Amino acid sequence: MVHSNTFFGSVLLGLLLLWHQSCFAFSDFDFWNSTNVIEIKQGSELSNKMNAYRMGGYELSNGAPLTLKNWYTPTFTDTRVTYMTQVHKKVGLIWGFSTGENAQKYSVDPSIKLGLVFRHEFDKTSALSLRGTTILAGRLRESACTANYGEIGGVQQVNCRMAASPMQPSQTLQYLYNEKPYNYNTLWLQYTKNFD
């Protein structure tokens, strides 16, 4: 069985090499005039996941309130820009990047998006499109807090969001986020038919 990431990467690499060769085959190819922005998006599924914790909080042992807002509010929200370069009347190269985001207790790494789209028109009213994309990097990483549990447990590392839970501090560490972007490998097949 072929690992999905290896297979997807091999397919994209092969297609990119074909695209590279086709660019040299057409001496009149103008990269920038063949390129359009197809997506500008601020925020992502990973951003939204961490956004939910900004409203949380709990009381410390002395009764003082502690809010998670300062720990989970980024200085800049992850922003993605995606382009499509039409290298042939039937083939487009999808490429782009995201900025990533950082807060005190988590980070989303910057990423690169690559893909290809093929479109075949059967006639003036019907077409078949195949599009595949992959996202490289863009991982969400959450860091722990250092908490003082006094005579009960002393100073320990703990998941910031779960410091007031009944779990042992060391047990909460397994719930720290360390995730790839959602839908980092995607494949779409679309058939369209227009009726007069």
Image (spheres, rainbow, N blue to C red):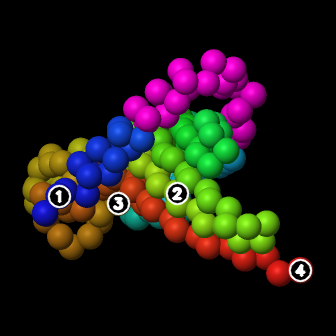
Residue 131 - label = 2
Q: Residue furthest right?
A: 196
Tell me whether circle 4 and circle 1 mark residues in contact (CB < 8 Å).
no
Q: Quadrant of the C terminus?
A: bottom right
**Structural distance between the alpha carbons of marks 3 and 2:** 39 Å
Mark 1 / mark 2, whichever is N-terminal = 1
Question: How far apart are labels 1 and 2 at the CA level?
Answer: 20 Å
- Secondary structure of the residue carrying tag 1 is loop
Amino acid identity at mark 2: Arg
Q: Of label 2 and label 4, which has the lower sequence position? A: 2
Q: According to the image, label 3 marks what residue?
A: 161
Question: Neighbour class for label 2 at 10 Å: few (<14), some, many (≥20)?
Answer: some
Q: Nearer the viewer, residue 109 or 137?
A: 137
Residue 128 image position (x, y, % from top left):
60, 66
Tell me, for residue 67, which label it has, or none: none
Query: Mark 3 vs mark 1: which is more N-terminal?
Result: 1
Residue name at image x 42 percent, y 49 percent? 134
Q: For the residue labelled by badge 2, is the local secondary structure a helix, a strand or a loop?
A: strand
Q: Nearer the viewer, residue 45 or 117?
A: 117
Q: Give above or below for 1 relative to 132.
A: below
Q: Position of residue 31 (x, y in %)?
A: 66, 25
Q: Earlier in the sequence, mark 4 or mark 1?
A: 1
Distance from label 2 to label 4 (Cα)?
A: 27 Å
Q: Residues within 10 Å of mark 4 (few under 14, many from 20)?
A: few
The residue drawn where x is 47% and y is 42% is 114
Q: Which mark is residue 2?
A: 1
Which is closer to the viewer, label 4 or label 1? 4
Could you tell me how far apart the alpha carbons at marks 3 and 1 are, in whole angstroms?
Answer: 38 Å
Disc 3 residue type?
Answer: Arg
Res 121 quadrant in image: bottom right
Give the residues in magenta.
16-37
Q: Is residue 142 left or right of residue 138?
A: left
